[in-house]
């Protein structure tokens, strides 16, 4: 008999046996915006047997043949052989087992707009499309778009995401975005922003920020909260708005009083200087897109413990070098991100490959990035950026069980040498066989266990049709 009994039927039966109500999150306010919470697969007890384990834990290291034992959402043991009588067995032979990818900046609300984009038509690129259609979003559109984005993330092995929500048009929109993350079962941070088109002299909805923390996020095990700020570098800010340091102080102070971190898009030298002079830099700040900084700026960022999130695939299109090597040399913490999926794919393998290749192109033999370093950036460094490294980012007993299995029997991976080299240079999202978040098996054999993917797509198409019509796109 095949020992892998964690099929859809088993898990749904377990869910029913436990009583679906006990599995439902308690965020009643969020439900009102997006319908009842979806029942997620139950957290059971299982052991991945005989996989090639890349733990990303320095003490455990790599196990060419290893077992990973998971119970009630936590990693119990990672070793060459684990005794786990009674646990479900997941066959790991022919698989790489590693922590799920941790992604640190993604504008999920834009996901349904993908069909409207054309890179070779300036009228149909990211900013014109998102600005014209973004102001038409209903909470339902937000829910469906984020659901599409996070389901794509899970399918690609991303188990944690930072939802960079820079179009929160009302409290109901905020609830809807959070509900979509919750219903998909992904781990992540909701970075609360203001609505597109909000005048730059008006603050974001700080009262609702406090409300959603108290009523929704604090009651959820998988989600945390932060804010995404409008630009402060004097640029117009695209769809993200642009504020002066006085407004930044007002909004950021309110967030910091609630213990919430901040994320901000900026490249170049201007914003680093402005923020430093305003006393706004700190270890709770993440900047996005490391391009165009100077050595003095990087030194300041390192001194204040600021993080930088790099989206290599999108940044490769922009002017200037992707300065991940310079940031790391200066001691600035770096993580990886997708940004959005309207004009490029959600593919962390491609992100690692592109970043590695560009660094090699720039620095040749002097490039310090190794294949293993790329995987660290994609896992434990991302977790550190989001303040989750004590919980996830490595396969360490005691941490929560966020892990992925990657098939090495597919044609592109069937003859591999070093597993890190294979993941960076050869792998693709379709090789991600199994995805586990917090001990819940969300995907198995490239298929969702509980999430209705066809419905996600159908709903997204319906939202797109409505948005197109209300925005009178493309006229
Ligand atoms: Zn972005």
Image (cartoon, rainbow, N blue to C red):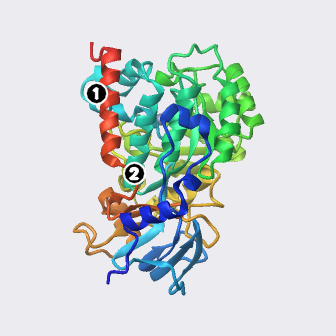
Q: Residue at x 35, y 53 (%)?
A: 350
Q: Position of residue 343 (x, y in %)?
A: 32, 36
Q: Position of residue 380 (x, y in %)?
A: 56, 60
Indicate which disc, 1 or 2, sits on the residue closer to the N terminus.
1
Dot 2 corresponds to which residue? 451
Q: Secondary structure at mark 2?
A: loop
Q: Is residue 258 above or below residue 90?
A: above
Report if residue 73 is visible in the image. yes
Dot 1 corresponds to which residue? 116
Where's the N terminus, which quadrant? bottom left
Q: Residue 123 vs residue 418: left or right?
A: left
Q: Which quadrant of the structure image shows residue 208?
A: top right
Q: Which quadrant of the structure image shows residue 314?
A: top left
Q: Residue at x 75, y 30 (%)?
A: 253
Q: Nearer the viewer, residue 142 or 159?
A: 142
Q: Nearer the viewer, residue 270 or 70?
A: 70
Q: Residue 300 vs residue 392: left or right?
A: right
Q: Residue at x 34, y 35 (%)?
A: 460
Q: Are marks 1 and 2 in contact (CB under 8 Å)?
A: no
Q: Distance from label 1 to label 2 (Cα)?
A: 26 Å
Q: Secondary structure at mark 1?
A: helix
- Nearest to the eye among marks 1 and 2: give it: 2
Q: Residues within 10 Å of mark 2 (few under 14, many from 20)?
A: many
Q: Position of residue 15 (x, y in %)?
A: 49, 61
Q: Which quadrant of the structure image shows residue 384?
A: bottom right
Q: Position of residue 241 (x, y in %)?
A: 54, 21
Residue reaching furthest right?
A: 257
Q: Residue 5 vs residue 243: left or right?
A: left
Q: Is residue 133 above or below residue 77?
A: above
Report if residue 330 is visible in the image. no
Q: Residue at x 32, y 81 (%)?
A: 2
């Amino acid at each position: 008999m095949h020992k892998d009994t964690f099929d859809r039927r088993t898990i749904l039966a377990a869910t029913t046996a436990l009583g679906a109500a006990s599995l439902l999150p308690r965020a009643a306010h969020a439900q009102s915006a997006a319908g009842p919470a979806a029942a997620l697969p139950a957290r059971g007890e299982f052991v991945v047997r005989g996989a090639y384990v890349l733990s990303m834990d320095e003490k455990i290291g790599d196990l060419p043949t290893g077992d990973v034992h998971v119970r009630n959402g936590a990693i119990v043991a990672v070793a060459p052989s684990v005794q786990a009588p009674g646990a479900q067995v997941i066959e790991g032979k022919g698989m790489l087992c590693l922590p799920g990818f941790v992604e640190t900046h993604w504008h999920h609300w834009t996901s349904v707009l993908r069909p409207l984009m054309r890179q070779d038509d300036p009228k149909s690129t990211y900013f014109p499309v998102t600005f014209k259609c973004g102001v038409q979003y209903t909470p339902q559109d937000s829910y469906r778009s984020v659901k599409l984005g996070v389901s794509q993330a899970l399918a690609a092995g991303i188990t944690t995401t930072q939802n960079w929500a820079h179009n929160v048009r009302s409290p109901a929109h905020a609830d809807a975005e959070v509900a979509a993350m919750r219903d998909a079962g992904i781990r992540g941070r909701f970075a609360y922003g203001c609505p597109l088109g909000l005048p730059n002299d008006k603050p974001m909805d700080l009262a609702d920020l406090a409300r959603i923390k108290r009523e929704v996020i604090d009651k959820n095990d998988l989600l945390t909260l932060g804010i995404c700020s409008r630009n402060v570098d004097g640029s117009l800010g695209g769809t993200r708005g642009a504020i002066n340091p006085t407004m930044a102080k007002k909004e950021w102070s309110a967030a910091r009083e609630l213990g919430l971190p901040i994320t901000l898009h900026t490249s170049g030298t201007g914003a680093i200087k402005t923020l430093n002079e305003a006393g706004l830099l700190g270890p709770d700040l993440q900047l996005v897109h490391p391009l165009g900084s100077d050595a003095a700026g990087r030194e300041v960022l390192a001194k204040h413990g600021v993080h930088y999130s790099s989206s290599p695939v999108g940044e490769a299109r922009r002017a200037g070098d992707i300065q991940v090597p310079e940031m790391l040399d200066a001691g600035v913490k770096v993580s990886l991100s997708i940004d959005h999926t309207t004009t490029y794919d959600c593919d962390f393998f491609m992100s690692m490959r592109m970043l590695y290749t560009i660094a090699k192109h720039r620095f040749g033999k002097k490039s310090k990035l190794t294949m293993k370093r790329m995987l660290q950036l994609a896992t434990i460094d991302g977790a550190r950026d989001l303040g989750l490294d004590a919980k996830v980012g490595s396969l360490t007993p005691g941490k929560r069980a966020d892990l992925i299995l990657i098939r090495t029997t597919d044609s592109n991976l069937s003859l591999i040498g070093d597993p890190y080299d294979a993941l960076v240079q050869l792998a693709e999202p379709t090789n991600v066989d199994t995805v586990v978040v917090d001990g819940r098996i969300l995907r198995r054999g490239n298929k969702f266990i509980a999430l209705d993917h066809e419905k996600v797509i159908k709903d997204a198409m319906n939202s797109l049709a409505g948005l197109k019509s209300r925005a009178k796109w493309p006229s």
